[in-house]
Each structure stands twice: as C-alpha cells, then as structure tokens.
Image (cartoon, rainbow, N blue to C red):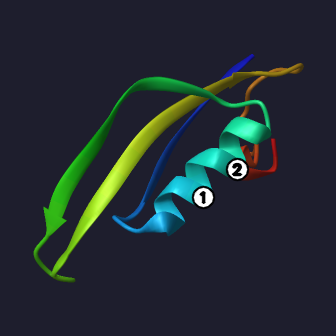
Amino acid sequence: MKLYRFLSEEDTSAFCHKVTEALNKGWALHGSPTQTWDHAAGVMRCGQAVTKEVEGTYTPDVKLGEQ
C-alpha cells in the first residue's frame, strides 16, 4: 500500500529534522514544500508531503508515524 503524510512545523531547524527523520525511515518527498504565515501564533510554518510504499492493506487505524 502507499501511505501519505503531511509534515508541518514552525520554520525552524525542527522542521528540517522532522523531514530528515522521515526520509531516513524510507519516506520519499512528494511535491514541493510549502510555507505560510500563522497569524494566530505569529510564526512562519513549513509543510512537506511525503509518501511510502509498505506491505499490507490500508485501514484508518494505520499509525502513519510508526511506519
């Protein structure tokens, strides 16, 4: 099955570490990264979609972060 996740974080090194960790767990970048201004928090936020092929059949109970 193919899994999809959208990673997001404040525009700090924490975002890069989150994406790097996913890549090292076998996830692949999907599309371009995004940035937006979070008015409520007063910070820039980054986002990146990632995908991964794994064994099994998808159900909503799949814990994507554990894959």
Residue 62 visible? The answer is yes
Q: Amino acid at mark 1?
A: His
Estimate the x, y position of residue 54 in percent, counting from the top left: 82, 22
Q: Which residue is mark 1?
A: 17
Q: 22 or 60, which lies in front?
A: 22
The extreme right residue here reads 55
Estimate the x, y position of residue 40 in percent, counting from the top left: 15, 81
The span from disc 2 to disc 1 (Cα, nearest Å) is 6 Å
> Which quadrant of the view contains residue 26?
top right
Image point (48%, 59%), residue name? 15
Q: Secondary structure at mark 1?
A: helix
Q: Is residue 57 above or below residue 5?
A: above
Indicate which disc residue 45 carries: none
- CB under 8 Å between discs 2 and 1: yes
Q: Is residue 46 above or below residue 33?
A: below
Estimate the x, y position of residue 67 in percent, counting from the top left: 81, 41
Q: Is residue 36 above or below residue 48?
A: below
Left or right, 52 with respect to 37, comes to: right
Q: Amino acid at mark 2?
A: Glu
Image point (23%, 50%), residue name? 35
Residue 60 visible? The answer is no
Q: Which residue is mark 2?
A: 21
